[in-house]
Amino acid sequence: MSTFQAIFLGALQGLGEFLPISSSAHLIIFPWFFGWKEQPLAFDVALHLGTLLAVLVYFWRDYVEIIVKGLTEPKSEKGKLFWFIVIATIPGALFGYFLEDIVENVFRKQYLLIAIVLALFGFILYYVDKTAKNRITISNMNILHAILIGISQAFALFPGISRSGITMTTGLLLGLKKEAAAKFSFLMSAPIIFGAGAVSLLKNIHDVANQLSSFAIGFFTSAVVGFLAIHFLLEIVKKSGFKIFAYYRFVLASIILVVFLLRM
């Protein structure tokens, strides 16, 4: 893997992990566009750990306060948020553990199917962004919100759905304000990314040593771009919501369809 490829894929992961555009779809589609070899699993570990660093650095004060309050004052506003994150993590972790390998094998080279999923979820994202009544702040969330948003993470296993996209959309459907839906999605991402990254790291620890240079480049690129993506999304949802990402999905799905037809 060249340095350019490592940087490019790291940037894709950093953007796709936090913007509602699906990092997994991008990491499958763009190497296909350019005719690159499939990246090693050890490199995917680096990308996920990079985005974990991004969210931990961006929200480190929130995490410290949430964890402390959760363990010492579980009935306080921040304390309840800690337990909501724990509850929301459980469904996604279970589905990921049992189904991730199956889904990945089914979707790995199904480019047309990924295009359909990208476009379909783009319509859902656009509709929900336009019609949802957003009144609930993150401090007014309840356990039902956490459970339903957590269950929605299971759909993120399918390339084209997007973990951040499905959790934010579910939050909007439940009445959360756009900023609240985005922030809760980011806060609850750390346990899932950590779990997935740790499992993959243990499985591919020997390959990491052999790919150390690419690993480091992908890690730092995804961390920096992921940090900027979080800031970008929090700012843009205040002004124009999520419609811009729906439009992007439509464009990318159309490009995939054209390339697929040309290569038939």
Image: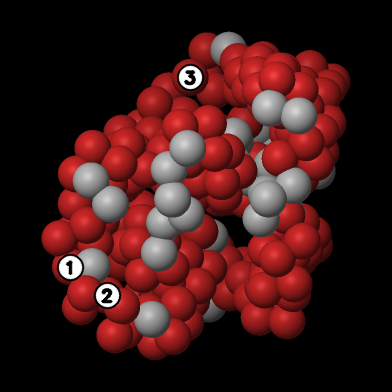
Do we see residue 89 in this rendering? Answer: yes
Looking at marks 2 and 3 on the same chain, the residue that comes earlier in the sequence is marked by: 2
Measure how far apart labels 2 and 3 are at the Cα level: 36 Å
The amino acid type found where label 3 is placed reads Ile
Please give the residue where the numbered disc 3 appears in the rendered image.
236
Q: Between residues 3 and 230, which one lies in front from this camera angle?
A: 3
Q: Residues within 10 Å of mark 3 (few under 14, many from 20)?
A: few
Q: Are marks 1 and 2 in contact (CB under 8 Å)?
A: yes
Tell me if residue 91 comes above or below residue 53 in the rendering.
Answer: below
Measure how far apart labels 3 and 1 are at the Cα level: 35 Å
Total labels: the figure holds 3
Picture quarter containing residue 182?
top right
Please give the residue where the numbered disc 2 appears in the rendered image.
208
Q: Residue at x 62, y 71 (%)?
A: 89
The amino acid type found where label 1 is placed reads Leu
Query: Picture coordinates of residue 11 (x, y %)?
Result: 34, 38
Q: Residue at x 23, y 67 (%)?
A: 211
Of badges 2 and 3, the one in the foreground is: 2
Q: Residue at x 30, y 56 (%)?
A: 50
Query: Picture coordinates of residue 79 (x, y %)?
Result: 50, 70
Q: Residues within 10 Å of mark 2 (few under 14, many from 20)?
A: many
Please give the residue where the numbered disc 1 appears in the rendered image.
212
Q: Residue at x 50, y 59 (%)?
A: 189
Tell me if residue 35 comes above or below residue 77 in the rendering.
Answer: above
Q: Between residues 39 and 170, which one lies in front from this camera angle?
A: 39
Query: Picture coordinates of residue 92 (x, y %)?
Result: 68, 69
Of badges 3 and 1, the one in the foreground is: 1
Query: Picture coordinates of residue 10 (x, y %)?
Result: 33, 45
Tell me if residue 56 comes above or below residue 71 in the rendering.
Answer: above
Q: Between residues 132 and 150, which one lies in front from this camera angle?
A: 150
Q: Between residues 56 and 247, which one lies in front from this camera angle?
A: 247
Q: Residues within 10 Å of mark 1 (few under 14, many from 20)?
A: some
